[in-house]
Image: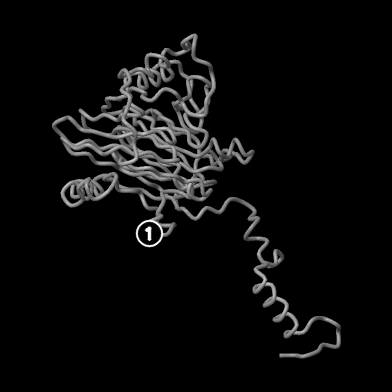
Amino acid sequence: MNDAREDGMPTDAELADFYGGMERARLIPLWKVYKDHVPRAPSPRAVPHLWRFKEVLPLVRASGVLAPLTEGERRVLGFANPGLPYDGLAATTDTLWGALQYILPGEKARAHRHAAAAIRFILEGEGASTTVEGERCAVGPGDFVLTPPWAWHDHENTGSAPVIWMDGLDIIMVRELRGSFFEGAGEAPPAEPKPEGGSAARWAGGALRPAWEKPGGKYSPLLLYKWEKTEQALRRLAASGQACPFDDVAMDFTHPGTGGPVYPTMSCRIQLLRAGQRPRAHRHTGSAVYLCFRGRGHSVIEGRRFGWERGDAFCVPSWAWHEHAAGEEEAILFSINDLPVMEALGLYREEGLTEGNQKVK
């Protein structure tokens, strides 16, 4: 190591002492890490991945035997992205949590509440219900139900067969912002029963709302979006000949009082991919988690082809090129995304692929 330099530049010893002093003072030299803090483009840690239902289902069923609800709050198997740490804080994308929840006949998942926003999209099974702040929401396949932040909620299956649904939460984002709170069943106040379907009676009337209800609010006041109405809306749009060049016949579930997303942190989408159509590839800031509800098809994500069918789930990281197409028959995808956050912060950016579709690697 040189102790002095004739050109006036700092010596190795001086630099070592300088950087050592910064470390001891808990300072970081930005000129050394600038590219890490300000990358030229988004660099998510999450990678594209597909969870095949036929591989996951045996484990879901086994959980019904090996993981009784008395062992924890919920019987949930989370989609752990291979690009992210596989530990108790595993996630599906850098900001979102996706999972499958399994409830056996006669079971009830006790009430709790948390600061994270959550949704449920029912994949299969009849006879289940979610009660949110005293309002019971009976659900079946294709139904979409909200459990807003800090709302007491429980789940029950009074049917004769197991029920499987997709859970979607912004819990990763909330955790990273250090805004997470939780209260369990022992802390729940006595529930004040409300009329079943009360929120739908007030808010599911399309372009109408009760005169005494004011527009606005952070979270959608409509708790349950029934599949029958969702499918009717998709079919009407498809019949009109209107479609998105990237997502085909795609519709977002909305807050009926504002027209915006159901949550300020998370948007939810249903899309009909028509047979014979090949939507263009695009990319955008913000990530998404998808579930195939009906049919089969494929997605190309960053040049990799992922074939999917009913029950399969997959994720698209932020700024990843992606495109979706149905097979010989139509397919329906449900998805959650964090685009509302990107838009609210002025970080949303989108671009279509000039060539139309990606080359598969």
The figure's colour scheme reads one colour
- The quadrant where residue 298 appears: top left
Q: How many marks?
A: 1
Q: Tell me residue 267's x, y (percent).
A: 47, 33
Residue 361 in picture, x, y percent from top left: 45, 53
Above or below, 47 against 197 in this view is below
Kind of residue sitting beneath label 1:
Asp
Q: Residue furthest right?
A: 7
Direction from residue 272 to residue 65 in the image, left or right: left
Residue 246 percent across, percent down from the top left: 50, 33
Give percent across and percent down for residue 318.
52, 46
Q: Is residue 75 left or right of residue 325?
A: left
Looking at the image, which is closer to me, 347 or 69? 69
Q: Give the camera-side residue of 301 and 200.
A: 200
Residue located farthest toward the left when viewing the structure as drawn: 160
Q: Quadrant of the N terminus?
A: bottom right
The residue drawn where x is 51% and y is 50% is: 176
Q: Which residue is mark 1?
A: 87
Secondary structure category for the residue under label 1:
loop
- Residue at 30%, 48% in the rendered image: 77
Q: Reply above or below: 262 against 60.
A: above
Residue that appears at 38% across and 35% down: 119
